[in-house]
Image (cartoon, coloured by chain):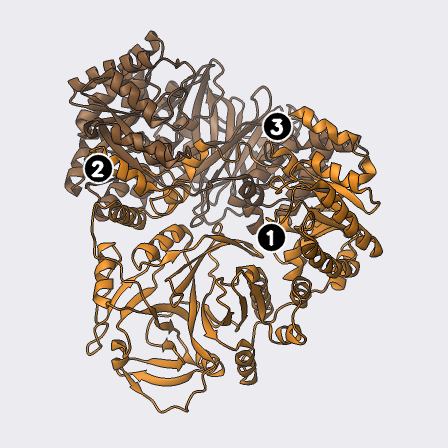
Chain colours: A brown, B orange
Amino acid sequence: MRTSIATVSLSGTLTEKLTAAARAGFDGVEIFENDLLASPLGPAEIRARCADLGLTVDLYQPLRDMEAVPGELFAANLRRARHKFELMRALGADTVLVCSSVDPAAVDDDTLAAAQLAELADLAQDFGIRVAYEALAWGRHVNTYDHAWRIVEAADHPALGTCLDSFHILSRGSEPEDLEGIEDIPGEKIFFLQLADAPLPAMDVLQWSRHHRCFPGQGGFDVAGLVRHVLRAGYTGPLSLEVFNDVFRQAEAGPTAVDARRSLLALQEEAGLAAPPPPVVPTGVAFAELVTPDAEPLAGLLGALGFTRAARHRGKPVDLWEQGEARILVNTGAAAGRDGARLAAVGLTSPDPAGAARRAEALLAPVLPRRRAPGDVPLDAVAAPDGTELFFCGPPPADWRADFDDTEHPPASPLVCGIDHLALTQPWHHFDEAALFHRTVLGLRAEDSVDVADPYGLRRSRAVSNTDGTVRIALSVAAAPTDGTVHAQHIALATDDVVTAARRFRDAGGRLLPVPANYYDDLAARHELPDGELETYRELGILYDRDAHGVLLHCYTLTVGRVFFELLQRDGGHRGYGARNAPVRLAAQHAVQMSAGG
Amino acid sequence: MRTSIATVSLSGTLTEKLTAAARAGFDGVEIFENDLLASPLGPAEIRARCADLGLTVDLYQPLRDMEAVPGELFAANLRRARHKFELMRALGADTVLVCSSVDPAAVDDDTLAAAQLAELADLAQDFGIRVAYEALAWGRHVNTYDHAWRIVEAADHPALGTCLDSFHILSRGSEPEDLEGIEDIPGEKIFFLQLADAPLPAMDVLQWSRHHRCFPGQGGFDVAGLVRHVLRAGYTGPLSLEVFNDVFRQAEAGPTAVDARRSLLALQEEAGLAAPPPPVVPTGVAFAELVTPDAEPLAGLLGALGFTRAARHRGKPVDLWEQGEARILVNTGAAAGRDGARLAAVGLTSPDPAGAARRAEALLAPVLPRRRAPGDVPLDAVAAPDGTELFFCGPPPADWRADFDDTEHPPASPLVCGIDHLALTQPWHHFDEAALFHRTVLGLRAEDSVDVADPYGLRRSRAVSNTDGTVRIALSVAAAPTDGTVHAQHIALATDDVVTAARRFRDAGGRLLPVPANYYDDLAARHELPDGELETYRELGILYDRDAHGVLLHCYTLTVGRVFFELLQRDGGHRGYGARNAPVRLAAQHAVQMSAGG
């Protein structure tokens, strides 16, 4: 029997995955859509590469949430499907996977589902493609193999069959006799069979308890609510942390103990047991400070981005670059580390710097010396868990600015209006600690964690921000450590016109991160954009996302040392950080790095 | 309010944990029993250390499965409790935690539970100790806080109260109003409050699907059974693997793809789709080969263990050491690596070496050259996923022995009769692959995974063996990688008299791994041993375990390079590998390493 493997099962770029599958003797592959989007190879090139390797392309799975939806939505789905069928023709894939819908708009109507799937199959047939419909274990209305098959049977279309997936079937804990119905499906209507195993029990309460506890405020329990009940009962004993956690068992005990006690301090505050100095929420980013052994590459980058060198520190080799409300310090006088330029410090505008520092100190943040050198303006500063120095700066005219002498500089025509957010990669063991720190020490609110697929492993990302979005920090971490590869930090610059800002950067000799053509083909399938827009984005490597509030447009510079910049335009109050586009961006950065590395 | 932390929440030795807790400003600690057992400090010394650090000992939790059990069992439990109360007096801990029973022998009888807990509290009171009874979320009969409280209330004993644990309460998904009953418990009867948070949802089917799938044969699903149904339906398409797995996303694609295809080959065989050469199960360990830059330390160790240098390889600097059926090759001619001596190869006695090699090759094991040097006897060999070379050797008189010339050696008086098992630490990314390899390629059966607590992180361990136990390999891996610390491999030597073997080793100048006194105090609490036995074990550092079949006695040599030896006596068909004692052994090894390292 022929064997095949989905590219998502393997690590690396699409090319690396295909090579590994072929060498191990697989006959074919399922191409996972994100792997294709992130690849610099076009569909026809991927087909050729597969052919060279002796691999067939057995399946492509770009379609989700197709069926049992209102007519207007289904029309848009068909439009998207047509784009993907064209791509599949180039890719040489003749079977498309359609998983049962999880769309809240989907209705529980098998007749409608069958009719729409038949219509989809009609379209597919024109392209010589077969549609394999599969029940996701968590499908909204269809979540068992026999339900999916009943719909396929009712649709009665030659280009429509079912796909069986061992995970989705067996994860529901089916009894052996529940599986016998499989034998009643005509074999030629089983278009595909996907296999995976999984550990049992995946996660019972015992496993949860022994491996995944965390400190109060780092999980999802209302621990403070519980404590309030216990206090009302009259309990006077200690608050004691008992946390079984695989990560804490490995992490250095000192920082973990500090993290632990910070969580209890915040809990006591929340439960009304203690009143540390209240949080002083920062109102803006005063500056970001980069430390580098060599100012030239950064100076070139900042200049091309439209920054001007506005001032120089009186006593130290530190330049201040300004554009709009974005201020970047470039420091060549501190230890840069062997990876070159890095983001070493952040100035946060605070309505009460001394109060912010008192809060931080009460919550065990390491306080840094107020005056870094004789003659410097004294500034309150603490260290974040990842070592980034956080300075609490007074509102404009900012205190720290007094250390700098203005230099003559050409008048700026700012396209960048400020720093939208900072993206800080966290050391592996301290991700939960970092989120708790930013939430409790700085009074920022933490958003939900999201998973982001890097070609060489998953990453988790979690943003913290103030209410009006003038301070945003995106924390991220690898799913598991590997070889100590250092991921870059970045500074996202806010602009009202990312197209003009990107053009100006490029015209000034700056290099933008190239984005694969496949990404724009997919964008065209997902959204109907006004004439010319897609071409502009493609030309400049601008990525696109949309949420309920508005649109996000963003592009990236190449990396210098461990730092790169993003130009970012939020329209209509878009709230995200481009997580949807991160896999493509990460793959593109790997590609640049690999081509630079030879 | 006072704050406290359980030592299990932090990494390292007990001393390191206490120091970290004190530095972070905690007022007290809960001592986790395993941390005490593994510590070289006695209870009074731990008390003094805590006092020096300004910490109180707020809780100790050595008692499990106490209540609602038949009278005879309860009498044994009280005996154990008395030992622990004596220890607690020395430790200065005045509250003991008793979790609701998970013992299958426990009965659903609240009156009995209350009566036995009152009797336990009576005993505790004599020692000035209070008993805090807590409902485990997975307790056999008692698993809610209000149930535990009802029992405490019924027992009505001044030294008995309840312990509330946020994890056990909130992990049950209680509604807010379910918690209001806490306020009805008199505060002075809430003896303790343990706090932990946890991510929500800890593991739903979506998370399970996206992060924890694995290749067929590596999990708990009957994937082959499903495939048989699909084949009976007449399906003729490919078998395709679609595996979302955080580890595979990071691991090198080449080996993962081979692992993947091996799983499909084994699945096809199981489903009757393919008939590769059948497995040839090895019947014994012919030899273990150590590679070392310097033979002297190993020669000293082997000599003291009672091995004699029996033969030397004709063409290479390889010595054969023999004792009973245990044969160790010491090779100074191959690359040893910077960590010194390592276990490089294993000879497996096979009823059909060529057949075993054909099986291995069909299942994609890298085949090694049959002849390693001109003139060598040709031997079939393959590489295991961790790089260990596996030689398939004919039954005695073994083929490979012909390469060796006997040397004159004193007649041995063997106390070691053979190799009981080999313990191989696996590279982090390839643990599931290793178990699948040994199961499918060698035809060994895999036992369940067990967690083992190392002071610096959890480890997972899984044994593979043949049916009669003449080939046993214990595979182990860290829960997550950290700094690339290399864990040692070891060779467990079977003996019928571990006491005499250990004495002989020590008398010959060998150094046994010292085991903390706390371990033996606990052993005395757990088991009533015949007069003198405990003292003998304590003197020699012999560890003890018991299962339904019999008793295991074992002790360890110090480590040379990356290798150490175990002397092991299985009585009455004991089936384990000493996992219960592994935390103590691992802590003792760390202690030796640290004192050696300065």
Chain to which the residue tagged by mark 2 belongs: B
The answer to which image quadrant residue B51 occupies is: bottom right
Q: Residues within 10 Å of mark 3 (few under 14, many from 20)?
A: many
Amino acid identity at mark 1: Ser
Provide residue B268's location: percent of width, then percent of height.
Answer: 24, 46
Is B199 on the left-hand or right-hand side of A543?
A: right
| Residue, disc 1 | B11
Q: Earlier in the sequence, mark 1 or mark 2?
A: 1
| Residue, disc 3 | A444
Identified at 36% across, 76% down, the residue is: B329
Is A202 on the left-hand or right-hand side of B471?
A: right
Chain to which the residue tagged by mark 3 belongs: A
Identified at 69% across, 63% down, the residue is: B525
| Residue, disc 2 | B238
Residue A277 makes an appearance in the image: no
Identified at 55% across, 78% down, the residue is: B502
**SS class of the residue under badge 2?**
loop
